[in-house]
Amino acid sequence: MQVLVRDNNVDQALRVLKKKMQREGIFREMKRRRFFEKPSERSTREKAEAVRRARKLARKQAIREGLIAAPKKAVYQSGNASTAGGRAVTRV
């Protein structure tokens, strides 16, 4: 994995590297490999991940076909709210 440092801006390069690693799933992999995982636990986990992926794909396809309603999107309001990192979140 390669990240370019522009104008000696190492902080920005670090942020880009972290984002790339997050996208690739390297942090998840490191956390998983911290301890030994028995083969039976591994197969159970992989099956659960496959089921999760299949359900997500089916849900997205059902939304696309109009069989179920799409989830409501969060709308951020500016103001003096101290929730959600200084933003008030309202579901529409």
Image: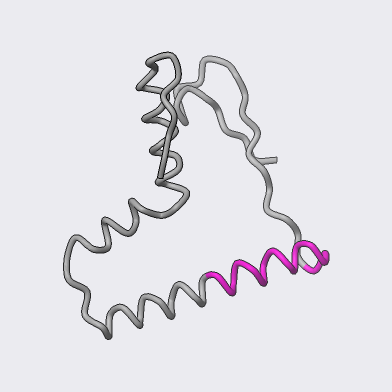
**Residue 9 versus residue 34 in the image, above or below:** above
Q: Position of residue 3 (x, y in %)?
A: 43, 34
Q: Nearer the viewer, residue 73 or 20?
A: 20
Q: Residue at coordinates 39% horizontally, 38% vertically from top-left?
A: 18
Q: Residue at coordinates 67% horizontally, 72% vertically from top-left?
A: 58
Q: Nearer the viewer, residue 69 or 34?
A: 34
Q: Is residue 49 left or right of residue 27?
A: right
Magenta-highlighted residues: 53-67
Q: Position of residue 87 (x, y in %)?
A: 53, 25
Image quarter for residue 89? top right
**Residue 21 versus residue 50 in the image, above or below:** above
Residue 59 covered by magenta stretch: yes
Q: Is residue 55 left or right of residue 7?
A: right
Q: Is residue 40 left or right of residue 6?
A: left
Image quarter for residue 61? bottom right
Q: Position of residue 38 (x, y in %)?
A: 21, 80
Q: Nearer the viewer, residue 50 or 20?
A: 20
**Residue 57 versus residue 12 in the image, above or below:** below
**Residue 4 versus residue 68 in the image, above or below:** above
Q: Residue at coordinates 47% horizontally, 49% vertically from top-left?
A: 23
How is the model colour-coded? one colour
Image quadrant for the N terminus?
A: top left
Going by the picture, which residue comes out furthest to the left?
Answer: 35
Q: Residue at coordinates 41% horizontally, 24% vertically from top-left?
A: 5
Q: Nearer the viewer, residue 29 or 1?
A: 1
Image quadrant for the C terminus?
A: top right
Q: Position of residue 15 (x, y in %)?
A: 40, 30
Q: Main secondary structure of the magenta part?
A: helix
Total tally of numbered discs in the picture: 0
Residue 85 covered by magenta stretch: no
Going by the picture, which residue comes out furthest to the right?
Answer: 66
